[in-house]
Amino acid sequence: MTQDLDAFAGIPRLKRMDNMDINWYPGHMAKAKRLLADQLSRVDVVVELCDARLPYSSRNPDLDKLLAGKKRVLLLNKADLADPAATSAWLNYFRAQGIDAAPYSASTGKAKDALAVIDRAAKEAVERAAQKGIRKTVKAMVVGVPNVGKSTFTNKLHGGNIAKTGDRPGVTRANQWVRITPYLDLLDTPGLLWPRLDDQLAARRLCYIGTVKDDVVDLAMLTIHLLQDMLKVQPQAVMTRFRFDNPELRGEELLEAVCKGRGFLMKGGICDYDRCCAVVLDEFRAGKLGRMTLEMPVKKARLTIPGAKKDDENKPQEENSDGED
Ligand SMILES: Nc1nc2c(ncn2[C@@H]2O[C@H](COP(=O)(O)OP(=O)(O)OP(=O)(O)O)[C@@H](O)[C@H]2O)c(=O)[nH]1
Ligand SMILES: [Mg+2]
């Protein structure tokens, strides 16, 4: 790991970090996408889960096309790990776009709150059936990128461990229908990424929350970026947790500071970067630094550039962006 960093000697520190190219689209995802499309005609409601700490980066852009015309709700899951004020800002942002969004925690939330969201979304379909004298069983499909909590959500609604969960991406490999009540069936699906992660900033952030497998990235680079991103939003929490006192540190200096602060040192006082990266990533993922959201729905004033792509108009910007990305 240290060798990788040394290999870039002479290149300015932040510059060399742009060399990370993240892509992960294992075979089971292509299959899962086909199977999801197959099931769509059978479902009344799609429940999309994203991670409340990254509500922009953790939404699969492919879903818009795939789910066009379907009744859909967006749950900002893991809201227990996110900054509540940031979650409110995101809810306003989504609702302003006509997206039915709500915060949720599949770990600590109540099943009845999630059921209320699904009931609201399914209301029209239920009423249409009632007009024909039928009491409908609503079919809802749970979708989202890997590791956002789809199976934990399914278990919460079911009231027991019917779907396999785990703190790594790609745990669910096949669709699984689960009966929640006589009037609600839920389909848990495998996490879906998209074939080319062309937004590499989003891709990197997906690694922070364990949506992209750790094996496909350079963990030292990833950890440096995570520390820098956390320092932008909550410098004091980062410095307290990792025991250093200079919020201006950047690049490899940050790994050194954490190693010294937390005592991740090997024989001869050499920094143990492997241990440092594992601990920083684990502690962020487990919410040990407190509730934190890493991106905000801030719109930049933009100039109209003739011929510019319109796709990114609603893409939120980083707060306090220092332009390194
Ligand atoms: N703190 C917190 N942890 C959660 C929440 N929901 C899920 N988790 C944890 O996140 C990890 C992933 O949960 P899963 O339910 O397996 O995620 P998934 O979306 O089904 O993942 P794949 O099947 O890989 O796509 C597990 O360790 C869960 O305990 C939540 O709301 N809050
Ligand atoms: Mg799952």
Image (spheres, rainbow, N blue to C red):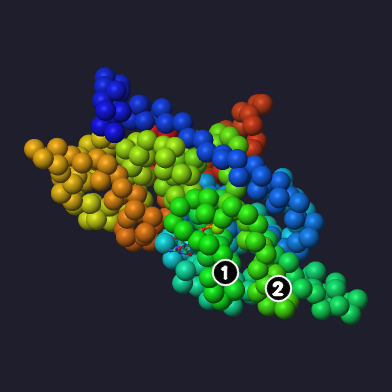
Can residue 76 be seen? no
Amino acid type of the residue tagged 1 in the rendering:
Ile
Secondary structure category for the residue under label 2:
strand
Q: Which residue lies furthest to the right in this view?
A: 132
* x then y, percent, for residue 284: 35, 54
Q: In this view, does 49 lie to the left or right of 183?
A: left
Residue at 27% from the left image edge and 42% from the top image edge: 274
Residue at 70% from the left image edge and 73% from the top image edge: 184
Q: Quadrant of residue 183?
A: bottom right
Comparing 294 with 259, the one in front is: 259
Amino acid type of the residue tagged 2 in the rendering:
Leu
Contact (CB < 8 A) between labels 2 and 1? Answer: no
Q: Earlier along the polypeptide chain: callout 2 or callout 1?
A: 1
* x then y, percent, for residue 129: 85, 73
Cα distance in 3D space between marks 2 and 1: 15 Å
Comparing 51 with 162, the one in front is: 162
- What residue sits right under mark 1 in the picture? 162
Comparing 257 with 141, the one in front is: 141
- What residue sits right under mark 2 in the picture? 184
* x then y, percent, for residue 290: 34, 61
